[in-house]
Amino acid sequence: MVSCLGIFRELSNSPNRESDDALILKAVMEQLSIYKARTQTMTPEEADTADLGSWDMIVPMCESYPRLRHLIALQRSKPVLMVNPPESVLACYRLSMYEAFARDPSILFPATEARNIQGASPLKPPAFDGAGGLWVKRGDVHNTCTHDVVYARDWSEVEAIRQDFASREISSLILQEHVDGDLVKFYGVGPGRWFTYFYHDPSTARKLPFDIDILAAMAAAGAGALKLEVFGGDAIITPEGRIYLIDINSWPSFARVRAEAAIQIAWQLRTRLKTLQAVRRP
C-alpha cells in the first residue's frame, strides 16, 4: 500500500483561512484513503521533528523558508515524491513568481517593479504610470495579514506603507500597476486535469465578456512556470476582454469548491503515486 503524508500550512500563513486550508488537506487525505492509500496529517511543528523519509509522497502546504529548505534537503537524500515540490512553493514567493512570469511571453501581468525597502532612503517611483493607483505588496510570501497587500491611490501614500513593511522586517516589496476590471479567482489541478473560476465579489462584478480558454491557458502557463500541480490564483478581466495574471500560489484553500476539488486533487496524487510505483517495480 502506498503512503501519503500531508503537512498543514502554518497558521500565520493562513490569514482568515486557517480552517479552510486544513479542511481541504483533510478532505484530500480522506479521498486518498478511499483510493487505498495509507494517509496521515501533521502540523508543521510535528513535521519538524518527524522522520519523513519513510513516506512515498509528501503533500506540503507549509510555506516557511526553513521548512521548505528542510524538505528540499530530504528530497536530495530520499526518493520522496512531493506535490507541490518545495522548490515550487519557494517559486511562489512574489519576487520569484514575477521573475518566472517575465520569462514566459504567453503570460500577461500588470507592470511590476521590485524594491528593497530597508534603510532610510526614499523609494524610487516606478517607471509605469500610476495615475490609476498602484498596489504595494510584500515581496516574499503571500498574505499573512490584511496589510501585506495595500492599494495606494497615488505615490504619496507609498512611503507610509514602506515604513509599515520595514517595521515588520520585510526586506522587499512589489510595486504593481492597478488594472481596472473584474477580479476573478481560479483553481486548478494538473495543469490540464481540472480548472474552475469565480468572481471575487459577484455583487460588484461587471461580468465583462472574456474567453475562458484564454483564462485557463494563462493559469496553466503560470502554474507551469512555477511547476505547480495544485494551484490557485487571481486574474483581472479588463473591459476590453484582456486577461492579466495577478497571483498564483500553491495549495490554496479551495473553500468554495472543496468537495469537487478534493476528488480532483486526490485523483492527481493517485496518478502520480501509480507512476512512481511503476518506476520502482522491478
Image (cartoon, rainbow, N blue to C red):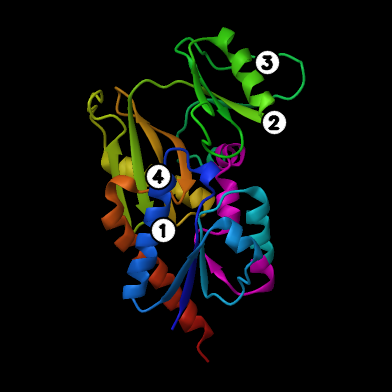
| Sooner in the amino-acid sequence: mark 4 or mark 2 | 2
The residue mark sitting in front, 3 or 2, is 2
| Sooner in the amino-acid sequence: mark 1 or mark 3 | 1
| Sooner in the amino-acid sequence: mark 4 or mark 3 | 3
Q: Nearer the viewer, residue 236 or 167?
A: 167
The residue carrying mark 3 is: 124
Q: Nearer the viewer, residue 150 or 81?
A: 150
**Rendered location of residue 195, percent (x, y):** 31, 51
The residue carrying mark 4 is: 219
Q: What residue do we see at 33% from left, 59% from top? A: 262
Q: Residues within 10 Å of mark 4 (few under 14, many from 20)?
A: many
Asked if the residue under mark 1 is in contact with the one under mark 4, i.e. CB atoms within 8 Å, the reply is no
- Left or right of 50 on screen, residue 3: left
Amino acid at the residue labelled 3: Lys
Amino acid at the residue labelled 4: Ala
- Residue 245 in view here: yes
Spatial separation of the CA atoms under disc 4 and disc 3: 31 Å
Task: Using the image, tell me which numbered label, if any, was put on residue 218.
Answer: none
Spatial separation of the CA atoms under disc 1 and disc 2: 30 Å
Spatial separation of the CA atoms under disc 4 and disc 1: 22 Å
Q: Which quarter of the figure has residue 68?
A: bottom right
Q: Which quarter of the figure has residue 12?
A: top right
